[in-house]
Image: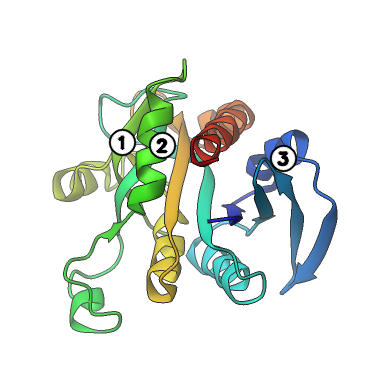
Amino acid sequence: MRKIGIVCASDTELAPFLTHISFTQTLEKAMLKFYIGPFNEFEFVAAYSGVCKVNAAVAAQILIDFFQVDAIVNAGTAGGMDESVRLFDTVVSDRMVYHDVADDILTEFHPWLKSNYFLADRTLFAAAQSYGQKTEYPVLFGTMVTGEQFIEDEKREQINQKYAPLSVDMETVSIAHTCYVNSIPFLSVRTITDTAEHKGIENFEKNCETASERAAEIVLGILEELS
């Protein structure tokens, strides 16, 4: 696991990586800019994909096919779903599921999953658990859900009852899905910008930069555990 792909949804989420890592090269593919550079024993290829599932999947497939990365980490922000999740907590994926896809689509048809859930790579997840015991920041481990909607009050209770997720976003599971069909290790790291108590786009916008910086710091810490 020497070449690591980093996918962020937005330029704000990618920005901290550009600060912490000396990227030495950029390449453009499919209207996306990919930044390439060393970090410890790794080579990073990082990009922001744009928001939503298809954009994220496109970026992930390019990282796999063109850059031939050994693993992909999704970094950025999310909404908190469980009542225990607070602003600026960081959620690390254990398992991931679409909240807006019919239950039988991925089990009865391609890619014929045993369940609707995609699982995080266990090596990356173990490194995250190890780092989580060291960092001063709260790191939570559990279920993430993804769908093409910013969740405020609408559907929150329904999603919570069905999936009991810690966080919700619009990209994670599509990247996990892409990695699954390509047999590429994957992990998602998302820091919370909004919750049921502190809800709405205005809270996301207010907290996005700080949350993105924290998510990036935690991703780099996790990868240092693998060095």
Amino acid found under the numbered disc labelled 1: Phe
Which comes sooner in the sequence, label 1 or label 2? 2
Q: Tell me how far mark 3 sits from mark 1, CA to CA.
A: 24 Å
The residue singled out by tag 1 in the image is: 141
Categorize mark 3 by other alpha carbons within 10 Å: few (<14), some (14-19), many (20+). Answer: some
Q: Tell me how far mark 3 sits from mark 2, CA to CA.
A: 22 Å
Q: Is residue 7 left or right of residue 112?
A: right
Picture quadrant where residue 105 is located:
bottom left
Q: Please tell me which residue is depicted at 80% across the width and 41% down the height of the picture.
A: 22
Q: Is residue 202 visible?
A: yes
Q: Is residue 149 visible?
A: no
Residue 97's place in the image compared with 65, above or below, is above
Amino acid found under the numbered disc labelled 2: Ala
The residue singled out by tag 2 in the image is: 128
Amino acid found under the numbered disc labelled 3: Ala
Q: Nearer the viewer, mark 3 or mark 2?
A: 2
- Percent position of residue 197, x then y: 35, 23
Q: Secondary structure at mark 3?
A: helix
The reply to whether discs 3 and 2 touch (Cβ–Cβ < 8 Å) is no
Which comes sooner in the sequence, label 3 or label 1? 3
Residue 15's mark? 3
Name the residue at the top extreme: 136
